[in-house]
Amino acid sequence: MTTHLVRAGRVVCPLSGIDAPGQVVVCGSRIVAVETGTYCRTEVGHELLDFPDGILLPGLIDLHAHPANANSVFGVPPDEYMLPQGVTTVMSQGDAGADNVDDYVERTVRSSRTKVLLAINLSRVGESTERGCFENPDDADVSACIDAVARHPEVIRAVCVNTSHHACGSTDPREMLRRGLLVAEETGLPLLYGMRRPEDWPLVEQLEWLRAGDIVTYCFRREPHCIVESGRVLDCVQEARRRGVLFDVGHGTASFSFDVAEAAIRDGFLPDTISTDLQARHLQFSPRHSLPLVMSKLLAAGMSESDIFRAVTATPARLIGLADSIGCLQAGASADLVVLKQLPTEQLHDAHGQSRSGHAWTVERVFCGDAVADCHESERDAAS
């Protein structure tokens, strides 16, 4: 078995604190060593892959997107649209529920090279229809959801409850969250929660229901809910964070505002995780919607590079219980690697047409569990 040396001008592991020139030594599908220093060893029989201007990171983790090869109205094939953009692990936000999870595991999880995990939808039908997943409250079947988690514990890492007006229709969002929490408590899983507009249900009340380890997504949305008022993060949001509630970006097609992100970051409120909410409607976008592009927007909004890298590697790995195998560069971990490079300053746009100037990261090379059969496609190639 050939040993590969993946060398870069910067090797960065947020978990261990490494940030230096060096190389990652890979044998088969595992990392066997991480070496830093300008002059690293090269032995006979080892294949060297050198990226002197690149940033070598653990494979990126997108905590909230819509990977699906079939039976999801939002789904996009992960190996085609996520893996080439540096995402080696992705968690679906509710594409499947109890009625279609077995098919999802077979046709998407087991059929993809990308590591696909699932925040199972409380709704039995998941996102398989155009109607809101909770329009029929009978679809929010607690027992069926618990049984589905028991069938696929290695895949299902969270419970998804989106209480938006579209998802619920006339169904009471409080009842949907109550049922979701029953599943989460019984299974020991965190909740991935999409907020309700405050005129229907005060945000302070929604957040009071959530527990330490639960994850609120769409945290930098401008409307119909917003965590910032008069340039400051709301007290109820700060209090939820103090209790251990976590916050995820979930950019999507309408859920990222530069104004909101900048105000929150100035107020010391950083997202715990950065995610794309990549879905089928993004496929017509140019430049292509990707996790490195969303990371670039957070950099332009004032978030530090080190905090950004942590929010797409070590932190999401810990939240989904896989911190020893992904999201890190250490011996024994999966050989999931991405090499980023930074493009010159360009215009970056939020979901409302506002723009900021900033450096954009693009993908130079991706390795997913096997350095021999790597995935290699730049963002510019993907957009053409």
Image (spheres, grey):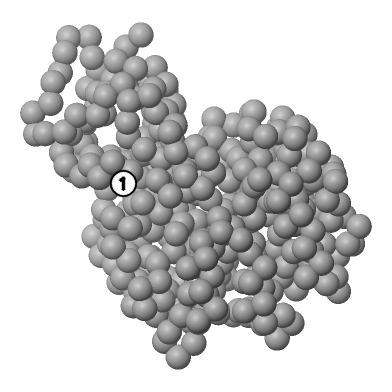
Q: Residue at x 39, y 17 (%)?
A: 28
In the displayed structure, 337 sits above or below 370; it is: below
Mark 1 — residue? 14
Residue 334 vs residue 17: left or right?
A: right
| Residue 305: percent from left, percent from top | 28, 58
Q: Secondary structure at mark 1?
A: loop
Q: Nearer the viewer, residue 109 or 72?
A: 109
Where is residue 119 drawn, in percent x and y? Answer: 65, 48
* Left or right of 136 on screen, residue 281: left
Residue at the bottom extreme? 230
The percent position of residue 24, horizontal first and vertical second, equals 26, 29
Amino acid type at image mark 1: Pro
Residue at x 53% of width, y 50% of height: 63
Residue toward you, 4 or 177: 177
Q: Residue at x 88, y 62 (%)?
A: 137
Residue 1 visible in the shown view? yes
Q: Is residue 272 left or right of residue 110?
A: left
Q: Position of residue 58 (x, y in %)?
A: 36, 39
